[in-house]
Image (cartoon, grey):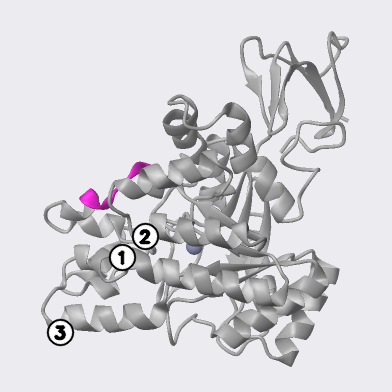
Amino acid sequence: MATALIRNGTILTDAGRVAADVYVEGGIITRLGQGLPPQADTVIDASGLFVMPGGIDAHTHLDMPAGDITSTDDFETGTVAAAHGGTTTIIDFATPEPGASLRSALDAWRAKADGNAVIDYGFHMVMRECGAQTRAEMGELARREGVSSFKMFMAYPGRLMADDAAIFGALRQARELGGLVMVHAENGGAIEVLVADALRRGNTAPKFHALTRPPRAEAEATARAAALAEMAGAPMFIVHLSSAEALEEVRQARGRGVAVFAETCPQYLCLSDAEYERGGFEAAKFVMSPPLRPIPHQEALWRGLAAGELHTVGTDHCPFGFEAPPHKQRGRGDFSKIPNGAPGIETRLMLLWDAGVRTGRITPEQFVELTAAAPARLFGLWPRKGAIAAGAATR
Ligand SMILES: [Zn+2]
């Protein structure tokens, strides 16, 4: 069994830091301590360095179909990029065809990943509805396949959007299973009206993508999701929270004791809607949902991270080509046809460290919490992942 020793480093976890060596056997940490005997196949000197758990990115879209195209990273290229950026585990989204079983999607996504991914991976299960058959499948996948999280959309009517009854039903079932329902919280119905309105007026440029998805549409759906979770007595996870208004709804719900957790992403912390003023068709590169927000939202999100009101930082990595392949060009003359998404799987940890830890907005311990420990706990990977402790995996 291959052994490794990481010497002289400072172990950094969500709970604090301690100077100790780390001894690894077959990919599992077996000993922590000072001055461990330096006999190992690989010895790494970590003097002056932090030794922290591998990053967990709980929000990626590799090899994801979008109509007749797919996102441009597959499970090989995407996970190689992730590994270069310090992320050693991803959780992607298995998405059934309309009317198809959850199992069929899990099998399909495993086939995309198996033998291609170079790091560990798991799947959230996307659901559009929550009838008796689907509820039974949730139980089977939770018990037999280790699927602990179920994703539903409050946006994209006619394609992915689930109604309140479905979300409420999923919450009640997830509560029984000890699982977690995740939602994309934007009011899809109102947004659809705003988009049609903009196009009718000839407002077709990429920036109207952002202008037709206002923060209040996100806040309304966030509040509704939290209320459904409250009534169901179940936890809820809000993905890619982008606005101060939505954060305020999370804060209020948590103040009532509702177990609402929320993720934000580097793009909402580091970029703003100024990108939509780029000339030519460049702004299409920044078309994602929710959209980039005006600058003041960034500070609100940083304060939310520091205060523990936002719980994880994932990427929503979902790259589409600009010119080669010309995916984004499909939206020339109609912003609603621009495939939504941007890359980020490789740069998450560097961006959060530079923009968050170096500036003093969050502590190194919070960095580990947001990027590894909290996603491990929320998605059933703790303590094998997200920790530097005896019994934990090194990736
Ligand atoms: Zn996403």
**Picture layout, residue 6 above or below residue 379:** above
Which image quarter is the N terminus in?
A: top right
Question: Which image quadrant is residue 191 in?
Answer: bottom left
Residue 389: percent from left, percent from top = 82, 31
Q: Give the range drawn in magenta.
A: 270-274
Q: Is mark 3 on a helix, strand or loop?
A: helix
State the residue position of label 1: 327
Q: In which quarter of the image is the C terminus?
A: top right
Circles 1, 2 touching at the beta carbon (< 8 Å):
yes
Mark nearer the viewer, 3 or 2: 3
The residue located at (49%, 80%) in the rendering is: 160
Q: Give residue 381's position: percent from left, percent from top.
A: 76, 50
Q: In this figure, which residue is indicated by the disc labeled 2?
A: 320
Seen from the viewer's position, the closer of residues 211 and 2 is 211
Amino acid of disc 3: Arg
> Any magenta on residue 268?
no
Residue at disc 1, CB closer than 8 Å to ligand 1: no
- Around disc 2, counting alpha carbons within 10 Å, would you say few (fewer than 14), some (14 to 19), or many (20 or more)? many
Comes first in the chain, label 3 or label 1: 3
Q: At x 12% / y 53%, what residue is drawn?
A: 279
Mark earlier in primary sequence (1, 2)? 2
Q: Name the residue under label 3.
A: 200
Which of label 3 and label 1 is nearer to you?
A: 3
